[in-house]
Image: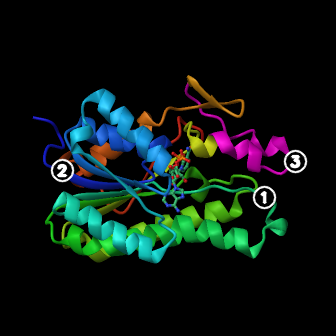
Amino acid sequence: MNRLDNHRTLVTGAASGIGQATALRLLDEGATVVAADVSTDGLAATSARAAERGTADRLTTLTLDIGDEQSVIAGVRSSIETLGGLDSLVNAAGILRASHTEQTSLDLWDLIIRVNLTGTFLVVREALPALLANPRATVVNFSSTSAAFAHPYMAAYAASKGGIQSFTHAIALEYGGKGLRAVCVAPGSIKSGITDATPGYLPADSDWALFSKLSPALPTDRESGGAGMGDPTAVAGVIAMLVSEDGAFITGTEIRIDGGTHA
Ligand SMILES: NC(=O)c1ccc[n+]([C@@H]2O[C@H](COP(=O)([O-])OP(=O)(O)OC[C@H]3O[C@@H](n4cnc5c(N)ncnc54)[C@H](O)[C@@H]3O)[C@@H](O)[C@H]2O)c1
């Protein structure tokens, strides 16, 4: 008996990094998974990795843009139809851009807020009726250590992640009486598409001294942009716990997974 046998879940951002590792981990634990992402090629890679592990028969992939309301409405509806209901929703899709705040255009600000914060809201809104039809369901949203600890040149990203934390606390209270749990994970220093791309987004005149407190305390075996990183599976395992009965009394909070970067 696996911990997540008969568990039906939708994972966004499942084409890469932490979302992909989470989809694979939930499959490994017995769940049936819809893996959604804007990257169709990345989803093909997720399918290939599931096939290698012998779990692809419980995986459906779905191309979806969480920043587009119609795409979310259609995609969440088809996910619920495919799964025959929903026991959990994992909102891993997100983007990071970096710039000096005084040079951040309104278009860039809007893009980051629309994908990360509004996108998370849209997917939750569309999934809520199916989640609430279930006496015990879970939403896992993705905050970031940047929501509570200063990360240079990432004010828009940090604001989007702080918004996700506030949103998650609010829905945890609003729907807790109906059995819905809502939790944030707050990763930091996890090797992924985002952390691999971050050095390319940072301003050329970045003050590198501002990054001096952004390294894990624990030894790491991965690297992005010259910095030590944890593996996405470190977050995936926590999410598997959160959506399972092992997380039954956890709601309205954040779990920071950063190797002690902000210890
Ligand atoms: N890696 C870290 O250290 C770290 C730290 C804090 C928070 N996070 C958060 O973790 C989550 C996963 O990111 P990751 O680090 O694995 O990076 P990643 O780039 O490897 O994965 C992000 C995924 O989101 C998808 N995506 C982006 N925009 C989308 C959209 N509009 N619609 C649907 N899918 C979209 C991407 O295609 C990609 O597959 C993100 O929310 C990120 O902000 C990561």
Residue 169 coordinates in the image, percent (x, y): 40, 68
In this orientation, does residue 49 appear?
Answer: yes
Asked if ligand 1 lies within 8 A of label 1, the reply is no
Give how far apart the Cα atoms at labels 3 and 1 are.
Answer: 10 Å
Mark 1, Cα crowd under 10 Å, few <14 / some 14-19 / many 20+, is some
**Magenta-tinted stretch:** 196-218
Q: Which quadrant of the rendered structure holds the C terminus?
A: top right
Q: Nearer the viewer, residue 123 or 137?
A: 123
Amino acid under disc 2: His
Residue 186 coordinates in the image, percent (x, y): 49, 51
The numbered mark, 3 or 1, whose residue comes first in the sequence reads 1
Query: Which residue does the image show at 27% across and 59% down from the upper left?
Result: 138
Which residue lies under the disc numbered 1? Answer: 99
Give how far apart the Cα atoms at labels 2 and 1 are.
Answer: 41 Å
Give how far apart the Cα atoms at labels 3 and 2 are.
Answer: 46 Å
Which residue lies under the disc numbered 2? Answer: 7
Query: Which residue does the image show at 55% across and 38% down from the upper left?
Result: 190
Asked if ligand 1 lies within 8 A of label 2, the reply is no
Work out whether 69 lies above or below 1: below
Which residue lies under the disc numbered 3? Answer: 204
Query: Which residue does the image show at 21% across and 40% down from the upper left?
Result: 57
Amino acid under disc 1: Ser
